[in-house]
Image (cartoon, helix red, strand yellow):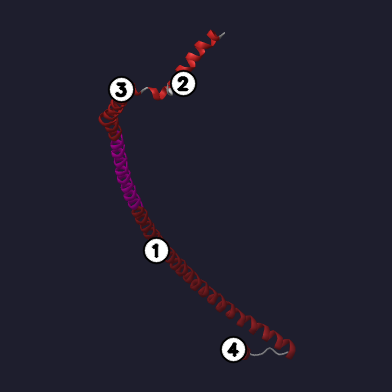
Amino acid sequence: MEQEHAPADAHGAEHASSSFPPFDQVDTFASQIFWLVVTFGALYLFATYWLIPKVGKAIADRENAIARDVADAAALSGKADESVRAFEARIAEAKVRSRDTAAKAKAEADARIAAETARVEADLASRLAAAETRIADVRKKAMANVSSVAEDAASAIAEKLGGVKPAPDAVRKAVAGALAKV
């Protein structure tokens, strides 16, 4: 049985004399450092000469595109502002023209109304004068007839009451005196 334990002891002795295996690679340490430097050097060269210039160019192109778009937007904004000013000027001009047109139309309408009013008033004045003339003629004729009717009536009344027919001149004077009081 001791033979069976002997290889185990040999194996245990072997383990006892060696160090921790990952730290036992001192002989490969130099090659690992070499490849680390080569890899990072290649990454540095790749980034410096290809990746960073490409990213920088993309950023510069984007900045140029943004600057160009901002300049275009500013130019379009200026044109829009100019168009708004021109439109407002046209609106103001149209308002002035419409006020002038309305004032002219009002003045023309007022002149036509004044002329028509004057014509109608002149027509009415002439009609009124003609009517007053006719009324005066009718009144004069009526008064002339009233005088003769009044004379006839007064003569008939005086004859009926007094039994004597009065003198026509006396009746005429009495009626004229009575009509003058009216």
Tell us which disc is closer to us: 4 or 2. Answer: 2
Q: CA distance from mark 2 to mark 3?
A: 28 Å
Q: For the point 46% across and 19% down, which residue is it? A: 15
Q: For the point 40% across and 25% down, which residue is it? A: 23
Residue 74 image point, x, y percent: 31, 46
Q: Which residue is mark 3?
A: 31
Residue 119 image point, x, y percent: 44, 66
- Asked whether the beta carbons under mark 4 and mark 3 sit within 8 Å of each other, the answer is no
Tell us which disc is closer to us: 1 or 2. Answer: 2
Q: CA distance from mark 4 to mark 2?
A: 175 Å
Q: Measured along the vertical axis of the image, is residue 175 above or below residue 39?
A: below
- Asked whether the beta carbons under mark 1 and mark 4 sit within 8 Å of each other, the answer is no
Q: Which residue is mark 2?
A: 16
Circle 1 crowding by C-alpha within 10 Å: few under 14, some 14–19, many from 20: few
Q: Which residue is mark 4?
A: 180
- The amino acid on which the numbered mark 1 sits, given as a three-letter code, is Ala
Q: Is residue 118 magenta?
A: no
Q: Kindly indicate the quadrant of the structure image that contains residue 54.
A: top left
Q: Which residue is mark 1?
A: 107
Q: Measured along the vertical axis of the image, is residue 31 above or below residue 62?
A: above
Q: Earlier in the sequence, mark 1 or mark 3?
A: 3
Q: Kindly indicate the quadrant of the structure image that contains residue 39.
A: top left
